[in-house]
Image: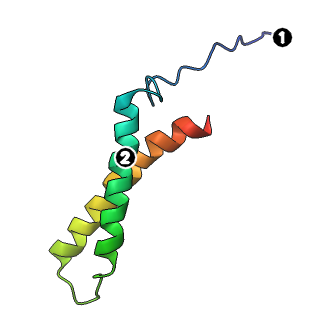
């Protein structure tokens, strides 16, 4: 039976250094975006234009993408 040698995890694709100012700035940026979205979601209305709705959806996607990198690092 062959064995697989497990190497060290390389999390640098998610975050080179979680204590770095750049990583901390990413966290602050996501917090700002989330706070902005909280204010926007109050205005959600079934009668809003599809253009406005899609704009909001793009913002949610951007927040989600950024959060997944931060959360991915934190969970490992």
Residue 28's disc number? 2
- Whether residue 31 sits left or right of residue 10 in the image: it is left
**Which colour scheme appears in the figure?**
rainbow
Residue 73's disc number? none
Question: Residue 24: percent from the left, percent from the top?
Answer: 40, 37
Give the camera-side residue of 59 and 23: 23
Q: Quadrant of residue 10?
A: top right
Question: Residue 53: percent from the left, percent from the top?
Answer: 24, 74
Q: Is residue 10 above or below residue 37?
A: above
Give the camera-side residue of 21 and 2: 21
List the single residue furthest toward the right: 1
**Which mark lies nearer to you, 2 or 1?**
2
Residue 1's disc number? 1
Q: Secondary structure at mark 2?
A: helix
The 10 Å Cα crowd at callout 1, few under 14, some 14 to 19, many 20 or more, is few
Q: Quadrant of residue 25?
A: top left
The 10 Å Cα crowd at callout 2, few under 14, some 14 to 19, many 20 or more, is few
Q: Residue visible at 52% across and 44% down? A: 71
Q: Residue visible at 33% across and 81% down? A: 42
- The image quadrant where one finds the C terminus is top right
Give the camera-side residue of 29 and 1: 29
Q: Residue visible at 61% across and 40% down? A: 75
Q: Is residue 69 above or below residue 54?
A: above
Q: Is residue 40 above or below residue 61?
A: below
């Amino acid at each position: 039976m062959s064995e697989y040698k497990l190497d060290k995890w390389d999390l640098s694709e998610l975050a080179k250094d979680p204590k770095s100012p750049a990583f901390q700035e990413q966290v602050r940026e996501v917090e700002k975006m989330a706070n902005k979205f909280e204010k926007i979601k109050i205005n959600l209305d079934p009668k809003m234009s599809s253009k406005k709705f899609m704009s909001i959806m793009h913002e949610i996607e951007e927040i989600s993408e950024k959060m997944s990198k931060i959360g991915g690092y934190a969970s490992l």
